[in-house]
Amino acid sequence: MSIEKNLQALGYRLPEPGKPVGNYLPVIVDGPLVYTSGTSCWENGKLKYQGQVGGEVTLEEGYEASRITMLNLLSRIKAEIGDLDRIERVLKVSGFVNSAPGFYRQPEVLNGASDLLVKILGDNGRHARSAIGTSSLPQNIPVEIEMIVRVGPAGK
């Protein structure tokens, strides 16, 4: 089953890819490697959640924010490479969690993104990961995630 059909079967849809908010590219393709810039939990042009996880944002909302963020990243990748089925392997996910003082459950927040990747890609969705707590993020977003994937040739 294709990646997008897996997403649909799980009840998810890819959003429209957002535009960068600065002078950078959302995705760079270098040979078989695709690098994404960081993004967050945008839905319909607005942030679904804002604030620090463990403060204004609950752990469960942080998990959901990570899942939404991963859908945004996949949307950006599709816009760049044309077909998500070209993804052969997710190599690395780096996540930053806007954390309230004393909050230390960043890996559980990022599981929202990681669990989604494994659900739709199986073992090819398993990846190396960093889960980093920060005291603030741009626009008071709760999470920012970037990733590196390996893709195969178009039309395979």
Image (cartoon, rainbow, N blue to C red):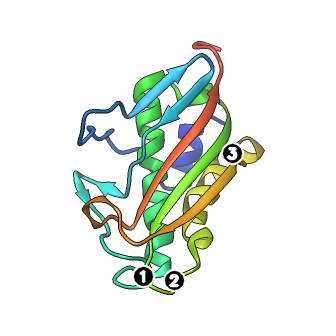
- In this rendering, would 22 be left or right of 78? left
Name the front one of labels 2 and 3: 2
Crowd band around label 1 with a 10 angstrom C-alpha radius: few (<14), some (14–19), many (20+): some
Q: Are marks 1 and 3 in contact (CB under 8 Å)?
A: no
Q: Are marks 1 and 2 in contact (CB under 8 Å)?
A: yes
Name the residue: 47% across, 33% down: 77
| Residue 133: image location, x then y, percent | 51, 69
Q: CA distance from mark 1 to mark 2?
A: 5 Å
Image quadrant where one finds the C terminus: top right
Residue 126's disc is none
Image quadrant where one finds the N terminus: top right
111 relative to 36, above or below? below
| Residue 54: image location, x then y, percent | 45, 84
Q: Residue 61, located in which quarter of the rendered image? A: bottom left
Q: Which residue is mark 2?
A: 103
Q: Which residue is mark 1?
A: 100
Q: Earlier in the sequence, mark 2 or mark 3?
A: 2
| Residue 65: image location, x then y, percent | 43, 65
